[in-house]
């Protein structure tokens, strides 16, 4: 597997508890390189657009409200098999089901307030990276 890029986001529950550094350490320890990073406070419209794929799900309203409730840290991660590797370091969506040592196991509060987002495939990674970053901002 060649070097790949993925999009990651540290969610408002984690920025609020000052966990950005601890989460970044786990990403870096897993061999992922943070090649772009910025802190943003999304409006509800922006959060809704980012998560539009979930617009018909029952938790969509709650998700949009949560994701616009405080700052997030948007990131581009680069590394070998980065999409899958990041999903592995994140752990399961529900922290009660997340494996030991994962970000969600150690830090997430609930299935909704689960500390991190990660792209679920290379195509969504490319779309999500371009939602937040221009090519000039990616410094590998
Ligand atoms: P993400 O997209 O944020 O990386 O998370 P994921 O792939 O593990 O989970 P996904 O099914 O894509 O859901 C997106 C986010 O919606 C919130 N959620 N809440 N209340 C609920 O039952 C529920 N289910 C999902 C979570 O914040 C989840 O990460
Ligand atoms: Mg997802």
Image (cartoon, grey):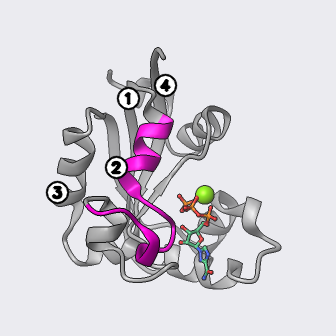
Tags 3 and 2 touching, CB below 8 Å: no
Q: Which mark is residue 38?
A: 2
Q: Which residue is found at the position 27% from the left and 77% from the top? A: 16
Q: Which residue is found at the position 22% from the left and 40% from the top? A: 28
Q: Which residue is mark 4?
A: 135
Tags 1 and 2 touching, CB below 8 Å: no
Spatial CA distance of label 2 from label 4 is: 14 Å
In-front residue for pair 19/72: 19
> Of helix, strand and loop, which mostly describes the magenta segment?
helix
Residue 109 point in image, percent of width and height: 37, 82
Local secondary structure at mark 2: strand
Spatial CA distance of label 1 from label 4 is: 14 Å
Question: Compared to 88, does 115 lie above or below?
Answer: below
Residue 122 occupies quadrant:
top right
* Mark 2 residue's CB less than 8 Å from ligand 1: no
Q: Which residue is mark 3?
A: 21
Local secondary structure at mark 4: helix
Along the polypeptide, which appears first: circle 3 or circle 4?
3
């Amino acid at each position: 597997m060649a070097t790949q890029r993925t999009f990651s986001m540290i969610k408002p529950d984690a920025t609020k508890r000052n966990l950005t550094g601890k989460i970044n350490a786990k990403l870096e320890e897993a061999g992922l390189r943070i090649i772009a990073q910025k802190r943003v406070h999304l409006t509800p419209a922006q959060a809704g657009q980012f998560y539009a794929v979930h617009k018909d799900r029952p938790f969509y309203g709650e998700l949009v409200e949560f994701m616009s409730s405080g700052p997030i840290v948007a990131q581009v991660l680069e590394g070998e098999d980065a999409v899958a590797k990041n999903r592995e370091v994140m752990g399961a969506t529900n922290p009660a089901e997340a494996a030991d040592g994962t970000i969600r196991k150690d830090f997430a509060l609930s299935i909704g307030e689960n500390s991190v987002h990660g792209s679920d495939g290379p195509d969504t990674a490319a779309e999500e990276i371009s939602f937040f970053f221009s090519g000039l901002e990616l410094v590998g």
